[in-house]
């Protein structure tokens, strides 16, 4: 698929805590950006993991309170302040990452809870109102089923469940399969099998979760090496993890080809 494509990818990664969502989502975002695509990385985990995989510092600064004002009666509690729309919000507040990825964080837990709520409203409004043709979206959800089931990934038409070959991770994957029955079900729902050392595990995951596996990511000690160095796998690691992520970007791009 060429870099001049009109259709933008809208992908969200979900799955059990620790399954590898952030490592995969951040690396996926950067590799997609290297295909000459504008990429906005959407982190809705209030304890962000994506910055590490994107190769940017983890910021302690919350989104400033004054980006929102109180919303109209009967509407959203907080809305972007007049004159600040989704595009200008991204221009002003999204972090510029290696490979040109823009990163938008949900908020963080260093501020008071009220700041977190305001940042959350701002984030949600930007995601709702951004121009879908302007950006490829790559989202990272917090571990578990809660955000996914409550529609936090409505921006995505492809939801990828990251599953490692443990009973608990497969169980969460199976629950997330129910997203297929939601009113706002994504067009594509599939599994990324992560931390695979034994090819038999891929079959186990596919059977247990009951969805097709669109990508297989090997267990790669280099990812842990990157972790320990607080670096991005893409900058520190190379090797099988990164290779498999190239293949995943290709597979997801191919799944869009011919569907629009
Ligand atoms: N393919 C892999 N090979 C080896 N280690 C991996 C692999 N993928 C992820 N890891 C390791 O697994 C741990 C969890 O990864 P990561 O933080 O990406 O998961 P997560 O699903 O985003 O977690 P959380 O739910 O806490 O946000 C990290 O230590 C990471 O280095
Ligand atoms: Mg994470």
Image (cartoon, grey):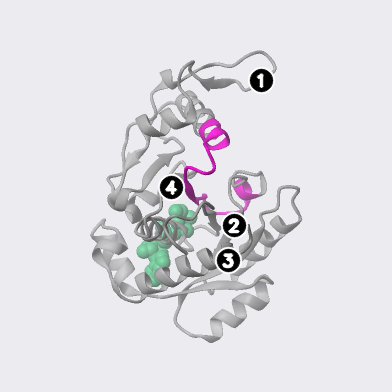
Does label 4 or label 2 sit earlier along the sequence? 4
Disc 3 is placed on an element classified as helix
* Proximity of marks 2 and 3: CB atoms separated by less than 8 Å: yes
Q: Nearer the viewer, residue 211 or 224?
A: 211
Mark identifier at residue 255: 3
Does label 1 or label 2 sit earlier along the sequence? 1
* Mark 3 or 4: the one toward you: 3
Q: CA distance from mark 4 to mark 2?
A: 14 Å
Decide if residue 155 is in sight here.
Answer: yes
Q: CA distance from mark 3 to mark 4?
A: 20 Å
Q: CA distance from mark 1 to mark 4?
A: 27 Å
Magenta region, residue range: 124-148
Mark identifier at residue 75: 1
Disc 1 is placed on an element classified as loop
Q: Which residue is mark 4?
A: 41
Does label 3 or label 4 sit earlier along the sequence? 4
Q: How many discs appear? A: 4
């Amino acid at each position: 698929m060429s870099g001049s494509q009109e259709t933008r990818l809208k992908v969200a990664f979900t799955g059990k805590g620790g399954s590898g969502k952030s490592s995969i989502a951040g690396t996926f975002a950067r590799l997609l950006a290297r295909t000459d695509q504008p990429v906005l990385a959407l982190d809705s985990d209030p304890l962000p993991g994506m910055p590490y995989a994107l190769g940017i510092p983890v910021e302690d600064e919350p989104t400033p309170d004054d980006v929102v004002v109180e919303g109209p009666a009967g509407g959203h509690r907080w809305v972007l302040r007049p004159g600040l729309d989704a595009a200008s919000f991204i221009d002003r507040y999204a972090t510029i990452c290696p490979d040109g990825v823009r990163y938008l964080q949900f908020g963080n837990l260093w501020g008071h809870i009220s700041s977190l709520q305001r940042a959350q409203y701002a984030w949600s409004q930007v995601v709702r109102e951004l121009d879908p043709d302007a950006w490829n979206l790559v989202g990272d959800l917090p571990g578990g089923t809660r955000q996914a089931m409550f529609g936090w990934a409505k921006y995505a038409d492809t939801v990828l469940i990251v599953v490692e070959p443990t009973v608990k991770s497969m169980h969460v994957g199976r629950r997330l399969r129910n997203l297929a029955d939601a009113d706002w079900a994504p067009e594509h729902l599939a599994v990324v099998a992560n931390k695979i050392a034994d090819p038999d595990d891929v079959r186990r995951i596919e059977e247990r979760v009951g969805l097709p596996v669109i990508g297989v990511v090997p267990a790669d000690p280099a990812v842990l090496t990157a972790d320990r160095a607080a670096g991005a796998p893409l900058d520190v690691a190379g090797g099988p993890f990164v290779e498999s992520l190239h293949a995943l970007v290709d597979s997801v791009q191919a799944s869009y080809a011919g569907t629009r």
